[in-house]
Image (cartoon, rainbow, N blue to C red):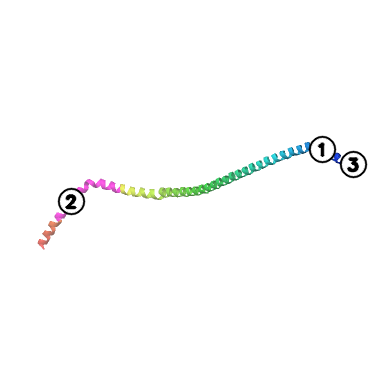
Amino acid sequence: MTENELLLAISDMMDHKLKSELQPIKNDLQTVKNEVQLVKNEVQLVKEDLQTVKNEVQLVKDEVQLVKDEVQLMKEDLETVKDKVQTIENDVHHMKLYQENIIMPRLNTIESCYTDTYGRYRNYSDKMEAAFEDIELLKRVVSEHSMKLQALG
């Protein structure tokens, strides 16, 4: 064998030995690459899940904000109603005072006046018929006297 052939044979042997020894490393490296790809896929899924969760959290936050806004509006409406109720309570209080201090005394005075008048008329009701009869009699007498006076005169 010549030197070149020997070198070629050594080179082939080294290539073969190197390939045989590198093959497990290549296999391990391929396994690592596959595992890294699996991890990348899982990370991508986790990222997508995280984005979905973020979107859902944002939706919940938006809904909570809407509820807060509605509660604030209800609080404001409730304050308005409270103010109106307070105004009505004040008006009713003033009306009660007016009724107690002005209307009732006047009504009592009017009632007393009518009651007194009724009492007087009731006491004289039986005498009224007699008074009407007396007035009729007076009218006739005055008429007769007027005629007699005119006949004399």
Q: At x 34% / y 49%, what residue is drawn? A: 110
27 vs 129, left or right, is right
Label 1 or label 2, whichever comes before in sequence order: 1
Quadrant location of the N terminus?
A: top right
Circle number at residue 3: 3
Disc 1 to disc 2, how far (Cα)? Answer: 165 Å
140 falls in the magenta region? yes
The residue wearing badge 2 is 134
Crowding at mark 2 (Cα within 10 Å: few <14, some 14-19, many 20+) = few
Q: At x 16% / y 52%, what residue is drawn? A: 136
Q: In terms of depth relative to the viewer, which is nearer, 55 or 69? A: 55
Disc 3 to disc 1, how far (Cα)? Answer: 19 Å
SS at mark 2? helix
The residue wearing badge 1 is 16
Q: Which residues are magenta?
A: 116-141
Foreground mark, 3 or 1, reads 3
Q: Quadrant of residue 27?
A: top right
95 vs 10, left or right, is left
- Percent x, y of residue 60: 58, 44
Q: Amino acid at mark 3?
A: Glu
Crowding at mark 1 (Cα within 10 Å: few <14, some 14-19, many 20+) = few
